[in-house]
Amino acid sequence: MVALGTGPAATARPRSQFRRALPIYLFLLPGLGLYALWMLYPLASALFMSFFDWQLARPSPFVGFENYARAFADPLFWRALLNSAGYTAVTVSGQMVVGLGVALLLHERLPLRSFLRLVYYLPVITSWVVVSLIFVYLYNGQSGALNWLLVDVLGVLERDVAWLAEPSTALWAVAALGIWKGIGWTMVVFLAGLQGVPQELYEAASIDGAGRWSRFRHITLPSIARTTGFLLVALTLGGLSVFVSIYVMTQGGPLNSSEVLLSYMYKQAFERLDLGYGAALAYIFAAMFFVVALVELWFVRRRLT
């Protein structure tokens, strides 16, 4: 007697399944090959490079974990880490609060609602380089539009401020750009979440005498909790990855006051050609990135269960 799950029929079953799946694998093969060539190979090369004092024109000596130890002893690395954390905290909170407010307004039946949604979303699809250059003009310390508004029109300030040239304001001026550019995307995601809230809940709450704030607190916020959790994780990872606006607007200055992890890594690797140290910084950043994502996902899932 042949035992269940053995014999020629059981052996032929995996083979037939493989034959049916073979065309799928063949179609996936070119994409997987390009992914391995452009992603996996550079990642492996950078990891290999991080263990060497990598030189372009002469042999590169093996240094082990020296580049990683050097990073944790580097005060500029810690300054860049703190700047990245501060930028992320400000931009994530700003985008979520303002984006939710705009989404709530545009979720109502307003005239020109579709046009207003388009206006708010336009910054999202605009090039980071373009909007960064525009904000450089707005922040100009002598003839910028922001100083003209605050000093000449509103009289809020007594003198012009060099927003991008002062250590106390440079990073937060760039963060304001990050908030402005990300409001539209946050708004769209929140709108998708708001459209999934049953209107019967609002109607029942209104009948029971609940005001607008009570309906928002006890119906809207719990109903969009998963949307909020997704945005928290996505915006945090995006904030930690800031580079273009920093590099275009401040280049990490003045006095490293706006230096972030990616800009510091870029300078070490491509401006100072300290490629081994730059590769080590990249992997330290990736590890931090991964840990932050896991912690946020754990926190979000814990709050939703």
Image (cartoon, rainbow, N blue to C red):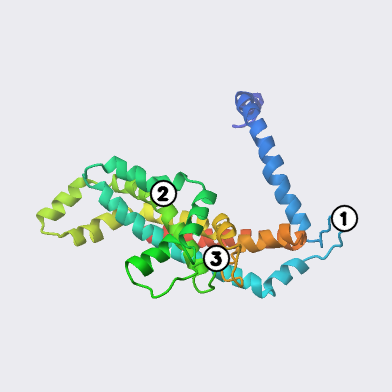
- Left or right: 229 in relation to 58: left
- Position of the C terminus, as image quadrant, is bottom left
Q: Residues within 10 Å of mark 3 (few under 14, many from 20)?
A: many
Please give the name of the residue rendered at 61% of the width and 62% of the height, measured from the top-left corner. Answer: 251
Examine the rendered structure and indicate whether residue 33 appears above or below residue 146.
above
Q: Secondary structure at mark 2?
A: helix
Q: Residue tagged by mark 2?
A: 185
- Position of the N terminus, as image quadrant, is top right
Q: Quadrant of residue 48?
A: bottom right
Mark with earlier residue (1, 3): 1
Toward the viewer: 131 or 286?
Answer: 131
How far is the residue under mark 1 from the one under mark 3?
34 Å
- Left or right: 176 in relation to 255: left
Q: Residue tagged by mark 1?
A: 57
Q: Nearer the viewer, mark 2 or mark 1?
A: 1
How far is the residue under mark 2 from the one under mark 3?
21 Å
Q: Residue tagged by mark 3?
A: 84
Is mark 2 in CB contact (under 8 Å) with mark 3? no
Mark with earlier residue (2, 3): 3
